[in-house]
Amino acid sequence: MGIYAMTGGATGIGGELRKQLVEAGHQVISVDIKEGDIIADLSTAEGRQAAVAGVTERAPDGLDGFIACAGLPPVARPLSLIAQVNYFAAVKTIEGLKDLVAKRRGTVLIVASNSAPMMPAENAFVEACLSGDEAAACAAVEQADGHTAYAGSKRAITMWMRRNVVAYAKAGVRLNAVAPGITQTPLTDQVFADEQLGQTMRDFQASVPWGGMASPAHIANVMRFMLSPEADFVCGSVFFVDGGSDAMLRPDAF
């Protein structure tokens, strides 16, 4: 059986994946701001350091996988929090745990979004994220809106993943991302309740080709495969689990 660590494992997609892994007999170290084996505020440098230190203490012999699942929705405020958690916390915890995952020739799995391709790479916020300048990214996103903050953070973390696949593979770590579409989670509920974005979400849900929205299990099932030995040769992939929405919006892009 394996040993895994994950951020954002308390509820939603992360909570479902944690449950599935534990039921399969694996050990899971959960990092979360409220409920988890390690309590840490990933919007801060101190919280990220605490997360890495806590996982390292609990898994000194290595990890079979690390899942960067913690994230904030487009209705989170201030918008800089979205940049801090969705992008910079993911990068810093992945970098901090890379060697532990390499010890077991394991997998790092990032939770992106099917909204990532909706944001152009040539965007000031995305570019600031990828440059590693957290202060500039936070300043840029505060001049934007919730959609730009969320989709931009997911665009940036997906591009970061693709740019680092070769170096990580050579170090013995598979890097991949899952890109959920609209999924029934507590964070999604917040967006549905938002006065500005709620109707947009309802319209988007109605457009999903397969119909409706995903459950956390739909996403976690794919993630569990991507973490498994059966996916051993999968590196640098972005798995869209969105009922066909990405293909509907970008039929010629893949």
Image (cartoon, helix red, strand yellow):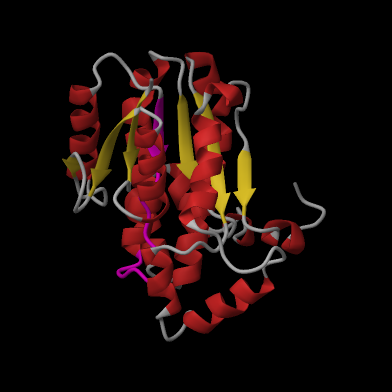
Decide if residue 61 is on the left or right side of residue 106. Answer: left
Say which residue appears at 59% left-offset and 56% top-offset. 114
The quadrant where residue 6 appears: top left
Image: magenta residue range: 65-79
Image x and y of residue 164, in percent = 53, 30
Foreground of the two, 37 or 97:
37
Q: Main secondary structure of the magenta part?
A: loop
Residue 112 visible somewhere in the drawing: no
- Of the 4 image quadrants, the one containing the N terminus is top left
Image x and y of residue 3, in percent = 34, 24
Image x and y of residue 107, in percent = 47, 26
Q: Residue furthest bottom?
A: 195
Specify whether residue 70 is painted magenta: yes
Image x and y of residue 14, in percent = 38, 48
The number of numbered discs placed on residues in the rendered structure image is: 0
The quadrant where residue 190 appears: bottom left
Decide if residue 217 is on the left or right side of residue 56. Answer: right
Specify whether residue 147 is painted magenta: no
Q: Residue furthest right?
A: 252
The quadrant where residue 21 appears: top left
Foreground of the two, 20 or 73:
20
Say which residue appears at 56% left-offset and 50% top-offset. 179
Say which residue appears at 50% left-offset and 58% top-offset. 215
Foreground of the two, 185 or 178:
185
Residue 35 visible somewhere in the drawing: yes
